[in-house]
């Protein structure tokens, strides 16, 4: 498909942000940080299980690297907090009508509504996400949508930014490693107190969903499956990311989004309620993930905890 075809650009309805919509020829966008290693391709994001909710290209650069605008355009979105999986981000509406997001930033240097030119420094790369400046290994994630915003197109309907860049005389990027698979099943059989968060054990002596250290990073996708009885209203599940200092003490705990599991239409024959929580992650530095449950009615028992993850370490 031709790059930059301005499909549905008029649907954006923001004339301020659509100065002269003309199609961009393929191979004209500038990479954010020049000729650097790609640590995860757009296809690699899609191949994750479950697939990335915002497929893009990860460029491996140290924190504080200058990020240059891919094209002439306008800054249409900017988030300066480290919360959620995106961390700090900046979004550009290119003059061709396409939409580009830069995630996990250390900082942005251009205000919302500013016009920028191709090659202008617009941000500095970081590793922000999950409520901290070190939620990821340092990199910049670039997502591209053709002819509209991600809200219009769907966050998962991004296209491969690398197919639209000025390729330069660069070697092809390495592919992602083949992920390892791990599956655990634990019969917990515990009563859950109502209204308070309780840690979900993964085994008799195992609490951590994933861990990284100063020397070992871990990238993956995990899903927690709970089987519960006595659910009349529901329960909630969340994952927390703990960052540790060099002596192993917890210095920060960042709760990830909460998933609420309502009571299912259980019958006397099948009184079980099933809960599920999925999370893609990229851990770098001394970090670990664990899960909690909060009962919304008394009398809930969690019978079984199953965790499946696909991951690799680097
Ligand atoms: Zn990414």
Image (cartoon, rainbow, N blue to C red):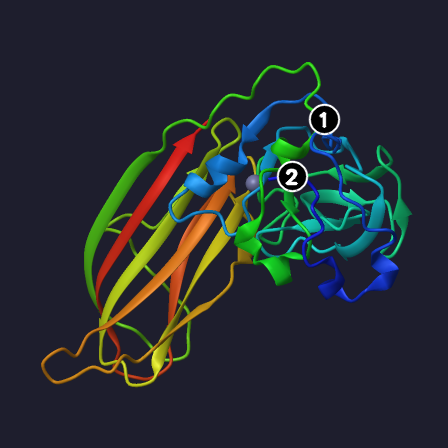
* 13 left or right of 306 in image: right
Where does label 2 land, which residue?
A: 2
Task: In the rendered structure, find residue 205 and report the number of the disc placed on it.
Answer: none
Characterize the local packing of mark 2: few (<14), some (14-19) or many (20 or more) Cα atoms within 10 angstroms. few
Residue 166 image label = 1
In this rendered view, identify the residue nearer to me: 153 or 21.
21
Check the image and report above or below for 165 versus 36.
below
- Describe the element under mark 2 as helix, strand or loop: loop
Ligand 1 shows up in the quarter that is top right
Horizontal placement of 229 versus 250: left or right?
left
Q: Is residue 146 visible?
A: yes
Position in image of residue 38 (x %, y %)? 58, 27
Q: Residue at x 83, y 56 (%)?
A: 18
Residue at position x 87%, y 35% from top?
A: 120
Q: Under tag 1, what secondary structure?
A: loop
Q: Quadrant of the N terminus?
A: top right
The verdict on label 2 being within 8 Å of ligand 1 is no
Position of 139 relative to 281 (above/below): above
Compute the Cα span from label 2 to label 1.
14 Å
Q: Are marks 2 and 1 in contact (CB under 8 Å)?
A: no
Note whether residue 138 is visible.
Answer: no
Residue 121: x percent and y percent?
85, 36
User: Looking at the picture, how far across and down is residue 239, in whole percent?
Assistant: 44, 57
Front tag of 2 and 1: 2
Q: Earlier in the sequence, mark 2 or mark 1?
A: 2
């Amino acid at each position: 498909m031709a790059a930059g075809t301005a499909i549905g650009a008029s649907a954006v309805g923001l004339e301020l942000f659509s100065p002269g919509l003309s199609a961009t020829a393929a191979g004209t966008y500038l990479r954010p940080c020049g000729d650097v290693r790609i640590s995860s391709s757009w296809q690699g994001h899609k191949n994750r299980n479950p697939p990335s909710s915002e497929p893009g290209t990860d460029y491996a650069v140290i924190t504080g690297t200058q990020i240059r605008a891919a094209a002439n355009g306008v800054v249409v979105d900017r988030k300066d907090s480290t919360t959620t999986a995106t961390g700090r981000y900046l979004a550009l509406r290119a003059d061709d009508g396409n939409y580009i997001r830069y995630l996990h930033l250390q900082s942005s240097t251009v205000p919302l509504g500013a016009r920028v030119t191709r090659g202008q420094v617009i941000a500095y790369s970081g590793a922000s996400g999950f409520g901290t400046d070190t939620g990821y290994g340092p990199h910049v994630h670039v997502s591209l949508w053709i002819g509209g915003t991600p809200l219009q197109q769907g966050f998962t309907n991004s296209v491969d930014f690398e197919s639209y860049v000025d390729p330069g005389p660069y070697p092809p990027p390495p592919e992602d490693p083949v992920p390892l698979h791990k599956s655990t099943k634990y019969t917990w059989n515990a009563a859950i107190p109502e209204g308070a968060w309780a840690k979900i054990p993964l085994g008799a002596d195992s609490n951590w969903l994933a861990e990284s250290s100063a020397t070992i990073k871990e990238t993956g996708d995990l899903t927690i499956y709970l089987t519960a009885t006595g659910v009349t209203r529901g329960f909630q599940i969340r994952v927390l990311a703990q960052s540790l200092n060099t002596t192993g003490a917890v210095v920060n705990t960042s709760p990830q989004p909460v998933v609420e599991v309502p009571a299912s239409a259980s019958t006397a024959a099948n009184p079980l309620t099933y809960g599920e929580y999925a999370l893609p992650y990229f851990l770098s530095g001394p970090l670990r993930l664990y899960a909690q449950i909060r009962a919304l009615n008394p009398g809930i028992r969690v019978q079984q905890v199953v965790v499946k993850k696909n991951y690799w370490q680097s």
